[in-house]
Amino acid sequence: MRFEMSTLRRVMSTLIILSSLVVLTGASASAQTRRYRHDNGLHRGWYVGQHRGWARRSNNNAARYRRAALRRELRGDRVAFRRDERVERRVARNSGDFNRADRRAFNARERQERMQFHGQERAERRQFRRNHR
């Protein structure tokens, strides 16, 4: 039985190709095995990105807290104004000695104050948006 070099080369190359295919398929199969996941395999989507900090370009907490404090303060002003407004209306409604002209004057003054407050509120919101872009 004779062995030639070309036969040996052909056998070796076939073995190398087959072994590389076996290694590659084994690697891809092992990559598909189930690993432990802290979220029980649920897809969290945007929550994960937000949780990991991907949602914000800069991690500027001080500015965020300042904006939140300003929003809280503006909301407190609105709540206080509306509370005072309700109290005034209740007092005006419950005091039975108003005649029609007085009631009209009170309502006009109240409407004017409300419009002035809402205008001021809009201006503050506009300035807040302009300063915190």
Image (cartoon, rainbow, N blue to C red):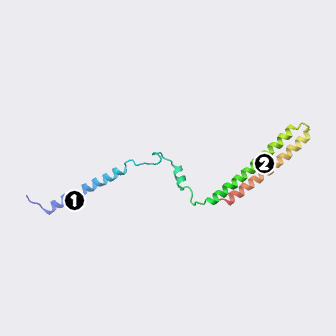
Residue at position x 89%, y 44% in the image? 105
The tag earlier along the polypeptide, 1 or 2, is: 1
Q: Quadrant of residue 10?
A: bottom left
Name the residue that disc number 1 marks.
13
List x then y, in percent, for residue 18. Answer: 24, 54
| Of labels 1 and 2, the one closer to you | 2
Residue at position x 70%, y 55% in the image? 70
Name the residue that disc number 2 marks.
81
Residue at position x 75%, y 52% in the image? 121
Q: Residue furthest left?
A: 1
Say whether marks 1 and 2 touch (CB < 8 Å): no
Q: Measure the alpha-carbon separation of dots 1 and 2.
A: 87 Å
Is 51 on the left or on the right of 104, as rendered?
left
Assess disc 1: are there few (<14), some (14-19) or many (≥20) residues with their C-alpha within 10 Å of its C-alpha: few
Task: In this rendered view, identify the residue nearer to me: 46 or 72.
Answer: 72
List x then y, in percent, for residue 117. Answer: 79, 51
In this rendering, the answer to whether 56 lies above or below 44 is below
List x then y, in percent, for residue 87. Answer: 81, 43
In this rendering, the answer to whether 80 lies above or below 56 is above
Where is the N terminus found, in terms of image quarters?
bottom left
Tell me which amino acid carries mark 1: Ser
Q: In which quarter of the image is residue 128?
A: bottom right
Q: Residue furthest bottom?
A: 5
Tell me which amino acid carries mark 2: Phe
Residue at position x 12%, y 62% in the image? 4
Is 29 on the left or on the right of 71, as rendered?
left
Is 19 on the left or on the right of 1, as rendered?
right
Task: In this rendered view, identify the residue nearer to me: 95 or 118.
Answer: 95
List x then y, in percent, for residue 37. Answer: 44, 48
Assess disc 2: are there few (<14), some (14-19) or many (≥20) residues with their C-alpha within 10 Å of its C-alpha: some
Give SS at disc 1. helix
